[in-house]
Image (cartoon, rainbow, N blue to C red):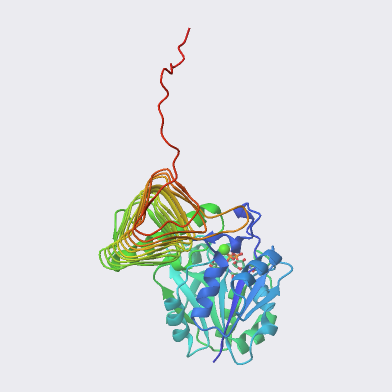
Amino acid sequence: MNLNVVILAAGKGSRMKSKLPKVLQPLAKKPLLSHVLDTSFNVSATKVIVVYGHGGDLVQSTIKASYPEAPIVWVEQKEQLGTGHAVQQALSELEPGSKTLILYGDVPLVSKESLETFIEDTEETGCGVLTVKLDNPKGYGRILRDESYHVTSIVEEKDATDAEKLVQEVNTGIMLVNSDLLTEWLPTLKNENAQGEYYLTDIIKIAREAHINVNATVISDPMEVEGVNDKRQLAALERQYQRSLADQLMVAGATLIDPNRIDVRGSLSVSADCFIDVNCVFEGQVSLGENVQIGPNCLLINSTIGDNTVIKANTVIEDANISDSCDIGPYARIRPGTEMKSGAKVGNFVETKKSVIGEGSKVNHLTYVGDAELGKDVNVGAGTITCNYDGVNKSKTIIGDGAFIGSNSSLVAPVEIGAGATIGAGSTISKDAEAEKLTLTRAKQMTVAGWKRPTKK
Ligand code: UD1
Ligand code: CA
């Protein structure tokens, strides 16, 4: 049976106090709705229908940009008349004979595993609800059951009697119903209730009247079904989520000095004996080899770090490929297109971009290396600049194996420094420098006889 997913995302989210629609608010740098979409595709939905209302244009353009090929259908709910009314807008899009999973655009963290269990549990009856037991169930729809523990209905907080309000099992909002049943039931909903809304939850009673047993799968981790209505809840969920990611990293063998002070906004893979100090942020796809050591306050984006590499405090690395046993920072900026080969070293206040730093080469202090290729065992002195840009074109600097670049040199690209060459400190090199030779450009030093320093009167 094909699985269709209907994501309810028409709510205005006014409590966010933001121009950005609620479902585009970021959790771990990804829109809430994208979390739900990713999970939908992970449970193999053949079609995903998003019911939108407020801010629809921005929601659609943002999502279309990150899922250009995905089978997402957009359905507008012009007036928000309730969750039942919202799902009704999607009915004509459901594939006949399919089953429909209803998710919320502002409940981002429900896991693939929980949904798979729920789908399996509901297989037999064709109608199910995902529930959770809460110490404080206030505000949620309560799950009502009969003496034989069968679910009979869901009652909203505002419609509940005092006795019903004591029930701690609540509706997460996530439901699974055979599409054909949904198509039959939804048009019969009435809005005669405390909120004057068409409640999706009323279909549970309808199912019982049709002698269909309603499956209720109880989820164990409340974080998975927590919704986001304001910035405080967004921040709280972000912390919970980050903490759960930190736990996964520690289970995988990483040492985190403080699991409350790490942020992963994407996917981070770690290996045995990785060590991560406080306040490190990882974005996109980052992978760390064995025994990688990362100092405090580092930002790593879309990069691969090889075994035994040490990254010291306050280093930023983006779109880079770092090999094993490298030594980076503190305060290094490794920009996109940097490749560091085994044992290479980049020290403090060094910026690299689109460059290869060869095996065992050292760029230790205060240097800019852009559009350059450094061979093996090169030593670049402090204050060296590759002048790669003439205002229009970018050009390359090539430095051969074993070359030694004296401090404060400018290498005006395109230029090639031969293997084993030495460049005298303070040189401006605009022509190729021969291998194994000393090349320098330097005004002759002189001493002015009889010169007197001015004195204050
Ligand atoms: C709903 C459930 C309640 C459940 C709770 C879980 C109903 C009647 N109640 O209550 O049992 O415990 O969720 O959080 O279903 N939406 C639309 N269009 C609408 C109305 C809502 O798209 O016309 C969307 C909202 O954007 C939101 C979701 O549906 O993502 C839930 O709506 P909300 O108003 O928050 O429902 P609750 O009253 O909290
Ligand atoms: Ca809600």
Q: Is residue 375 above or below residue 48?
A: above
Which quarter of the picture shows residue 402?
bottom left
Number of residue marks: 0
Q: Nearer the viewer, residue 427 or 387?
A: 427
Seen as rendered, the residue at the extreme top is: 457
Q: Check the image and report above or below for 55 versus 379.
A: below
Q: Residue at x 29, y 54 (%)?
A: 257
Answer whether residue 235 is visible to the viewer in this image.
yes
Ligand 1: which quarter? Answer: bottom right
Q: Nearer the viewer, residue 406 or 239?
A: 406
**Quarter of the figure with residue 201:** bottom right
Relative horizontal placement of residue 184, taking residue 446 as reference (left or right): right
Residue 404, given in percent of the width and then of the height, sits at 35, 53
Q: Position of residue 94 (x, y in %)?
A: 64, 85
Q: Is residue 448 above or below residue 180?
A: above
- Residue located at (36% from left, 56% from top): 421
Looking at the picture, how far across and down is residue 439, in whole percent?
A: 40, 50
Frontmost residue, 386 versus 127 = 386
Residue 241 x/y as whole percent: 43, 62
Which residue sits at x=64%, y=60%? 21
Q: Quadrant of the N terminus?
A: bottom right
The image quarter containing residue 61 is: bottom right
The residue at 45%/12% (across/down) is 455
* 94 shown above or below 68: below
- Please say whether residue 154 is visible from this viewpoint: no
